[in-house]
Image (spheres, coloured by chain):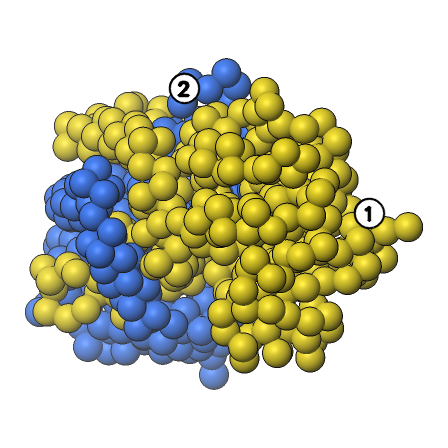
Chain colours: A yellow, B blue
């Protein structure tokens, strides 16, 4: 018997499509219903075998589903949850893939009718591509998935969501939503803010007689790959995780300011120490 | 007849060793003499067939060489040039691979005796590895090599150095040394300063009950790969290219400050525009 009888996925793109693919591949889902606005993308998802059928109305699409995965932009998750809540089947579990958790969990948990459960989640996986055509069944393999239960989270619902992500190949980590938001602000949101700023700084620099970007080599391109990420998605993340992002941005600014001072003062030993500390930090995670 | 009769390479590591390999592979060099302090590394280079023989004293090693390539840390290039200048054969050309050019070219050109020539160069290639074992013949293929002639550069020497890098597979770009230093400050030195600062900021963050770095995924590791670069090399680069590095660091800080303000104010349209500009800049170089 599969883990999930009927899975409803709101937002059938890279994240939603990849989860659908692996659950089907593993035989752990009966039927998959895709929910979204764009008929072309949903039709494509049917052709690819990612979903079985689709609906445009979330309230209709979730009918009879025992698991609902919200894979839409972070700013839409609470409103979609409010929309579907009255139509959830008894025992249904709603979970999401949003990369910000405190606001979402605080908003969605109280929306659940008795016997329906919300469990916040965040699979730490992705590429800079999007859309169902970019989805693939091994996206989550070997990655971490952070699940953010609270004091009121239903234990069985938590276990079922955890099992789903383990089946997808991920290592499940349980974490407080507030801590989650700090962690991702540091390891994901801050690097994006830095990369976007770096590309704009170099791209806007007019201290030479031509655009300096044309001299960029592979190193610069690799380093700034994440600055090609979806601007709308990152606008929403910056807004939803504002407090933690600002805290980390200011923490970066302190270190950057320290380095600037070392360069300005021509402090050789200080520079070597700064760079060496960084290398040691980095090697600790390899 | 090969382009180079006898090539002397001071510093037989990734950069020097890779040039030796490709010139030999292409049959464009008669004999290759390695020069350095460490006997073990030089012996290894002989075993690998990268060099034919070696000397520890630069003044002795350059005897009879028509091309001398200085592949040592940027802070040593001027002093080595001063050391070898009196021992250069008539017509000998000294060139380098240092990633900073204004100071080096200004210091080295006047050191040349009559009939000997200095030509500044900077192959834009490398990996985070070092040592002759890391060298390979295709390192320079498809990469840019910036050559920085001045008003007094000998035309034939410039042509021979340019040919050498084209044979190595690189696209040769001629550039004023001052402009070169600004360009590399923007596309290489600034990204390193940013990456080192980012890793230190995240690594030193203690706002959670454990080290956040352990949650970093592939994206963070890719983004910060350059923060594993050699601390001593980057200390020297920061010191030698201080003016341009500071200018670019401050230019970055302006953009980063703009982004911080947009986040703090919760300015959605402004954030989307900032991220979108960055994506457009980046796509212009792909």
Closer to the eye: label 1 or 2: 1
Please state which of residues B15 and A78 is positioned toward the viewer in this rendering: A78
Q: Are marks 1 and 2 in contact (CB under 8 Å)?
A: no
Res. A5 visible in picture: yes
Compared with B167, A74 (above or below) is: above
Identify the chain of the residue marked 1, using the numbered disc in the image. A
Label 2: which secondary element: loop
Identify the chain of the residue marked 2, using the numbered disc in the image. B
Q: Residue furthest top?
A: B209
Which disc, if any, is residue A3?
1
Q: Quadrant of residue B284?
A: bottom left
- Looking at the image, residue A43 sits to the left or right of residue A185; the answer is right
- Looking at the image, residue A212 sits to the left or right of residue A111; the answer is left
Residue A27's spot in the image, x, y percent? 85, 57
Residue topped by disc 2: B207
Which disc, if any, is residue A281?
none
Residue B13's spot in the image, x, y percent? 50, 49
Please state which of residues A243 and A8 is positioned toward the viewer in this rendering: A8
Please name the residue shown 38% across and 72% down the image: B286
Q: Residue furthest bottom?
A: B1
Q: Quadrant of residue B126?
A: bottom left
Label 1: which secondary element: loop
Please name the residue shown 69% across and 48% down the image: A89
Q: What quarter of the picture does the C terminus of chain A occupy?
A: top right
């Amino acid at each position: 018997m599969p883990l999930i009888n009927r899975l409803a996925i709101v937002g059938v793109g890279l994240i939603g499509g990849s989860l659908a693919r692996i659950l089907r591949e593993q035989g752990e889902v009966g039927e998959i219903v895709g929910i979204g606005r764009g008929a072309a993308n949903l039709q494509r998802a049917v052709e690819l075998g990612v979903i079985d059928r689709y609906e445009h109305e979330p309230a209709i699409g979730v009918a009879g589903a025992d698991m609902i995965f919200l894979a839409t932009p972070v700013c839409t998750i609470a409103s979609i949850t409010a929309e579907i809540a009255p139509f959830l089947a008894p025992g249904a579990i709603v979970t999401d893939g949003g990369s910000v958790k405190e606001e979402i969990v605080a908003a969605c948990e109280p929306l659940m009718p008795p016997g329906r459960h919300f469990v916040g989640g965040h699979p730490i996986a992705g590429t800079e591509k999007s859309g169902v055509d970019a989805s693939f069944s091994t996206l989550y393999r070997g990655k971490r998935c952070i699940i953010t239960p609270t004091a009121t989270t239903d234990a069985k619902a938590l276990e079922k969501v955890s099992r789903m992500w383990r089946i997808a190949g991920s290592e499940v980590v349980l974490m407080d939503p507030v801590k989650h938001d700090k962690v991702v602000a540091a390891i994901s949101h801050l690097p994006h803010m830095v990369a976007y700023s770096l590309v704009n700084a170099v791209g806007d620099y007019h201290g030479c007689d031509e655009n300096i970007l044309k001299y960029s080599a592979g190193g610069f391109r690799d380093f700034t790959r994440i600055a090609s990420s979806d601007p709308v998605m990152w606008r929403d993340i910056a807004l939803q995780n504002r407090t933690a992002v600002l805290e980390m941005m200011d923490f970066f600014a302190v270190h950057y300011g320290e380095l600037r001072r070392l360069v300005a003062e021509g402090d050789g030993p200080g520079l070597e120490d700064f760079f060496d500390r960084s290398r040691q930090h980095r090697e600790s995670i390899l």
